[in-house]
Amino acid sequence: MFMKLAKHKTFEYIPRIYDPKKDESQKTRIRFRSLREHRRKSYSFIWMLALLFFVVYLIILLSKIANNY
């Protein structure tokens, strides 16, 4: 009948200090990281395409050599 009401939980909050210079450097670092990852993806596509052409060239070259014998 007479019960205690639930209280909200208390917590300790330690505020962080905002440093605009550090924030700006982190933004540029993130921007360069995303550009670098984008370049990697395009390079991998170019390398795969070059590898495909090289394999096709080898197959054609080997088939010509085999037909001569």
Image (tube, helix red, strand yellow):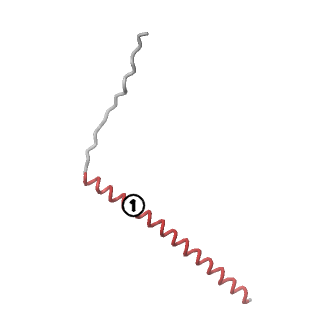
Indicate the position of residue 41 as horizontal and vertical percent values: 48, 65
State the residue lying farthest toward the front: 1
Q: What residue type is labelled 1?
A: Arg
- Side of 24 relative to 49 (left or right): left
- In the displayed structure, would residue 45 be above or below residue 64? above
- In the displayed structure, would residue 12 be above or below residue 37? above
Q: Which residue is drawn at 52% across and 72% down?
A: 47
Front residue of 3 and 12? 3
Indicate the position of residue 55 as horizontal and vertical percent values: 61, 77
**Quarter of the view holding residue 27:** bottom left
Secondary structure under tag 1 reads helix
How packed mark 1 is, by other alpha carbons closer than 10 Å (few <14, some 14-19, many 20 or more), is few
State the residue lying farthest toward the right: 69
Q: Which residue is drawn at 28% across and 56% down?
A: 24
- In the displayed structure, would residue 46 be above or below residue 64? above
> Which residue has dot 1 on it?
33
What is the number of callouts on the image? Answer: 1
- In the displayed structure, would residue 41 be above or below residue 2? below
Q: Which quadrant: the N terminus?
A: top left
Q: Which residue is drawn at 39% across and 21% down?
A: 6
Indicate the position of residue 46 as horizontal and vertical percent values: 51, 72
- Side of 66 relative to 7 (left or right): right
Q: Which residue is drawn at 44% across and 67% down?
A: 39
State the residue lying farthest toward the bottom: 68
- Side of 12 relative to 69 (left or right): left
Indicate the position of residue 14 as horizontal and vertical percent values: 29, 37
Q: Which quadrant: the C terminus?
A: bottom right
